[in-house]
Image (cartoon, rainbow, N blue to C red):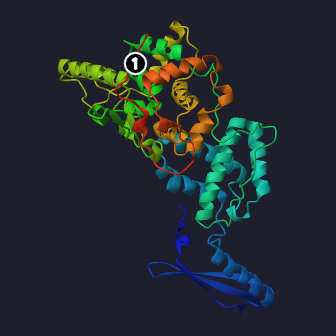
Amino acid sequence: MLDLSLHDFVDWEVKPVFPLKEKYAYRVVLKYLDGTERVQQKGGYKTEREANTARDNTIGELYAGSYVVYSNVKLGEFLEYWLEKDIRYRVGSSGTYDTYKNIVYHHIIPFLGTRRIKMIKRSDIQMLYNDRTDYSVSVARLVKTVVNISMKYAVVKKLIPENPAEGINLPKKVKKETYHTRSIDDQKALSVDQIMILLEASRGTPIHMQILFNVLMGLRRCEINGVKYSDIDYINRTLHLQRQLGKKLNTKKEDFAPKTYTKQEVRLKTSSSYRTLPIPDYVFEAILEQRETYEKNRKRRSKTFQDMGYICCSSYGRPRSKDFHWQYYKQLLKENGLPDIRWHDLRSTFCTLLLKNEFSPKAVAKLMGHAKEIITVDTYGDNKLLIADCVDEMQPFIEDVLPKTEEAFDTSGEEFDIDVSQYFDRSTRLKIV
């Protein structure tokens, strides 16, 4: 594994040019916080003037912070380092890491892995994008993301002076997408009447609570499975999201008990995912009912019950797997004549209803656990495709479930923290007709 610790120098000195083997050279002394020094020699210049010009350029780079400390590192070596030393510790579960690793080893390293990263040009990046686009547009988009992120990291580690992928786009034949966009239409979201039907039909099924957490609170699939009764503030009626269930990095299936490998408690997707959400009364009452069932099962199966405190669990207390809902969910849609939409589109429906009713994008971003306001707006707020046939029905739903206040309409764009509890009237509850 590479050692890229040399970039952390705190001071430097460039020595004068001197003769070396009938040519000329100079030395760069990098000084570190612990008092150590590392000397890098730059040589091979035919004339003293040429060496002094190169020395002046080096001094300029050191002042500008663009001095390249490493000059012989290959792209493949760097990407392996980046995956293990950066991505592995920045993601909460194995999902993102596995995706990035697949792109690195199967689509980038075979194409440019043996090239020195310092020598990679913008034209090389464009050729990579063109080649992968011919293979698969979806893969090409992932390649573009991985290359951009990794190259920015390479700049920080002083392997390259600037990101060669900056401004390089996929071929023109690929339709350009706005960052994190997702079009929402009546085929990918439910109307208010359809939401009511789904909520009522899910009663008595093992996924009733999962549906409530999704469509009425906007939780992600793995967040839902990780919610515990201890996360509920029963006095203020709020939910503190602080974990999800998934696979832990650096682990193998045999390291865990049977059927628990993908049900490990891992940290949430981003720092913004840690959030406190007001609980609508309809959901709060369902939680209390579910707790009664939980306690009955715990007493009835005292010897075999796993008292782990998960709200969405089996009758033996075991947490649900990430795909447990799928069979029941698809059956509910089919039996009740509802559109065959993805599970994640229920979360999109929740966000769309809020945005369409002019809730502050900043507040909606906090509720959804998005890192930036623009992600919520771009992902779920395409007004041209917002369930045009049920706009009139949205207002009663919002008033019944999430009544809005004047503060919800703030769109000034000022940077400030929003107390999202003001968007929820805890005295109201959803009425199923």
Residue matched to label 1: 208
Q: Give the residue at x 56% y 33%.
A: 358
Q: Which of 206 and 431 is in front in this view?
A: 431
Q: Give the residue at x 67% y 45%.
A: 143
Please give left or right for residue 306 compared with residue 427 in the image.
Answer: left
Q: Give the residue at x 81% y 37%.
A: 173
Which quadrant of the figure contains the C terminus? top left
Image quadrant in which you'd find residue 39: bottom right
Q: Where is residue 220 in the image (x, y as percent from the top left)?
A: 47, 32
Q: In this view, does 125 lie above or below 284?
A: below
Q: Is residue 286 above or below residue 65?
A: above
Q: Is residue 324 visible?
A: no
Q: Which of 220 and 396 is in front in this view?
A: 396
Q: Which amino acid does label 1 sit on?
A: His
Image quadrant in which you'd find residue 186: top right
Q: In this view, does 193 lie above or below 47?
A: above
Q: Position of residue 152 (x, y in %)?
A: 62, 58
Q: Position of residue 372 (x, y in %)?
A: 55, 45
For label 1, the SS is: helix
